[in-house]
Structures are given as C-alpha cells and as structure tokens.
Image (cartoon, grey):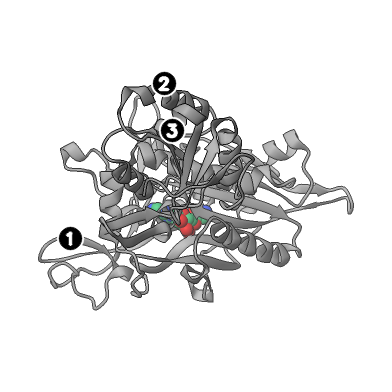
Amino acid sequence: MTEQIPSKVDMDKLVSLCKRRGFIFPSSEIYGGLGAFYDYGPLGVELKNNVKKAWWKASVQDRDDMVGLDASILMHPQTWVASGHVEGFADPLVECKQCHQRWRADHVKDGKCPACGGELTEPRMFNLMFKTFVGPVEDETSLVYLRPETAQGIFVNFQNVLNSTRRKLPFGIAQIGKSFRNEITTGNFIFRMREFEQMEIEYFVKPGTDEQWFKHWVEQRFNWYSNLGIKRENLRLRQHEKDELAHYARDCFDIEYLFPIGWSELEGVANRTDFDLKQHSKYSGKDLSYFDEDTKEHIMPYVIEPSAGVDRSVLAFLADSYDEEKDKEGLRVILRLHYALAPIKVAVLPLSRNEKLLPLSKEVYDNLRSCWMVQYDDAQSIGRRYRRQDEIGTPFCVTIDFQSLEDRQVTIRERDKMRQIRVPIDVLRATLEAKLCGEPFEILPPGARKWLGFE
Ligand code: GAP
C-alpha cells in the first residue's frame, strides 16, 4: 500500500502531456482500451530506449564482472513450479457483493468496497500468471505461462553462461525484457501494468560474501537514479520487515520514489541466497553448482538481485523532470530530463519558413541527424517552437536566421535556463557533442559568443 504523501507533480498533468505529445497512449484505445496496458508513442519509445540503454551501459558495458542475456518469454512450465510461482505467486482477491468490482484485499482500507462502500467477500488467493498453450491442443500438457519476471530466464541459463564464458565468481547476468502479471488492482497509469518491462540482474557470489555484495548493489542502484537526475529528496531506501520478505529472500531493500501517488517501490534489491539455483537443480535434475578452483569444492552460489521496472523508471524520470515556470506568454512547461534520456537531443529551427533559409537549415539538419535524434520544425513562431521542445525535454535548439546565410553562424539555445550562444557551423556538431556530454554551457568554442536574440 502506498503512503499518501503527495508529490509536487500531478499525475493527471503527466498523463495528459504523455498523450498530447506522443509519449504514452492507452493500449487499443479506439476499442475503448484494455485495462492496465499501455503503448509507447514516438517520443515514449525513444525515452524508454534511452532508459534501457543507460541501464545496460551501467550494468553491463561499464563493468568487467557482468554479461548480458535475452531469454525467451515462454519457458518450460516446470520453471515456475521450481521457482514457487505456481504455488505462491498469488494475491488475495476480494469482490464487492454490491457492484462486483474486484480488489486486492491488502489494497482495501476499511474492509469496504473503495468504489461504492459495499460489503466485500472473503479473500481468495488469485494466481497472477497469465496462461497460454503451446501447439494446437489446449490441455494441461500444453499449458505454459507468460513469464511474471525475467529472473528465472537467468537462473535456468546459469550453467550455459558459466560454460560459455568461463566466468569466475563473483559475476552477474543482466537482462531486460517483458514480464506479465494479471494484476488485480491497477489504475495508476504505468505504475502497475499487466504487461511491463523489467531490467534485472542476478549477481552470483560466494556464500559469506553476499552481505557485502548486497550493500554494493543497493548503493549502485540508488546512485544510478540520482546520477540520471532524480532528486535525492525524492528517493529513499526501505528495508523489508522480516514478515514482508519474499519466500526466497534473506534481506531486501526497496528503492522508493515519491511518485505522484506517494512513496512507492521503484526497484527491489534482494539477497535471494542459493534458493533459485537449488530449486532448479532439484526440479531439473541438473547440477547447477559452481566448481571453486581455489578450494576444489562445488558450491552453490548466493544471488544478489537488483530488479528494476523500465516503466516505473520512465514514470519516475518523467515526474521528476516535470517543471512549470510562469513567463510572459503564460506557462512554460519543461521536462528537465537528463540529456542521456531526452528523446530528442537537438531541434533545428529555421527562424521562419522563408525559402532562403531552407538550404542552410537542411544542411545543418542533415549534418546533425547522423549523430542523434534530431527534429526539424519550421511551423509557427520561434517562441512557440522553443516551448514545444521544452515540453518534450529537448536539451538544445539550433536556430538558423538570415545572418547565418552571411556568416555561417547559428544560435544554440539550451532548455534549462534558456541561455544562448552563437557558434560557427563548422564547430556546431563538436560543440553539441561536448554539451550533451556535460560540458558547461558557458564554455564557448573558438569563434563563438554569447547571444541575446530570439526569446
Ligand atoms: N525478480 C524479482 C521481481 O520481479 P518485483 O518486486 O515483483 O521483483 C521488480 O518486481 C520490479 O518490477 C518492481 O520494483 C517494479 O519496478 C517492476 N514491476 C513489478 N510489477 C510491475 C507491474 N505490474 N507494473 C509495472 N512494473 C512492475
């Protein structure tokens, strides 16, 4: 249950911006939508890909002790017996006797229906896994589940990865992919969906070193969010109480974010012990132990699992970067997204639609688009176009004016403080590259100067 401390950002504003500007749409909307399924639009897919890219870079590319994996969504059904999901991946479901709406019992406050106040049935356990069938016959023998977490795809491949990469402990396997849960309580936009994406790491360590690695990963993952711009005051760690721990976990910290719905889980980091490898050894009959060359012993590694949601991260990055400023034209809405996450890095804006500006503007656009996602926009006033880019988080706008035709210089305007510099086209790409990598905007390239036009 989320703690009801309101964040400064209104969920309705975010939902409306996401729809209006093409970040996120309700799924199959023309048919009335489907509960808790969402589609990512042109800007949303860029943002989401950038979140995944940043995670993959930090979790795999920048580390010597990690490798990647992409396992299939449908797995052998025994996987979910071994993992405990068939038996225990269930929530308590209650139904209103009056309006027949269904709720998760632990999400209902005073035992009454949150919609109409009616009396509720006794809770019954409801398994959250979606079922389907492999092959033409639909019976018990062809039953499979859509994976409710990506983690098990990693555990069942532990020996494959070990044998093919000759890794030594400690090492980890990272995976990004879709997961499916037939959630009972939904309705908080992309916070809780029935089809969502996870970014999971299973980090295998020698027993006895697990606590030290657990601390390491809690810290790493907390810093990942704040390094990507999430304000420290909107992030916190919460250790699970003993009676709250999942059946496989010895310890668990939630990284919580102050979402528009209150403080809620963004990511969980758990010490899963040797539970999963032991279970899969038992159910598959295959030895999943690790041979320690130093001690000449077979050991069952312990596992530290940082498990993040892509969609919850997207929601946190959107909520945290959303800002409004009063200005002479009314309200400036800004997404102050980290540059690495911004869907569009640069907008190319000719000062007007005058055809004399077209060739140079296209030249600049073609030059930049080979490096980044770049938008070309020549519709409406320059002020309106700057506002449009601010609202989608574009870090830089490049403006081509009539003087540019004479001196081959253009204006770069930055999103956050609306400062502007005038730079030669020859150094434009290198300048933008440096700024996108974090060089302070005040540092001017050769031949550039401060500029006070166009706002
Ligand atoms: N393998 C461990 C595991 O799956 P979890 O706490 O159930 O743990 C991990 O899920 C993360 O996945 C959560 O912190 C959240 O970010 C994301 N997640 C879980 N269920 C979700 C849902 N229904 N919609 C969106 N994200 C979800």
Mark 3 vs mark 1: which is more N-terminal? 1
Q: Is 369 placed above or below 255 here?
A: above
| Relative to 95, 225 lies left or right | right
Of residues 22 and 293, the one drawn nearer to the viewer in this rendering: 22
Q: Position of residue 149 (x, y in %)?
A: 48, 48
Residue 305 appears in the rendering:
yes
Density class for disc 2 (Cα within 10 Å; few <14, some 14-19, many ≥20) is: few
**Callout 2, which amino acid?**
Pro
- Return the mark for residue 359: 2
| Relative to 10, 304 lies left or right | right
Q: Nearer the viewer, mark 1 or mark 2?
A: 2
**Callout 3, which amino acid?**
Gln
Report the Cα–Cα distance between label 2 and label 3. Answer: 14 Å
**Could you tell me which residue is drawn at 23 percent across and 38 percent down?**
28
Mark 1 vs mark 2: which is more N-terminal? 1
Of residues 189 and 413, the one drawn nearer to the viewer in this rendering: 413
Residue hosting label 3: 403
Residue hosting label 1: 101
Image mark count? 3
**Could you tell me which residue is drawn at 62 percent across and 42 percent down?**
445
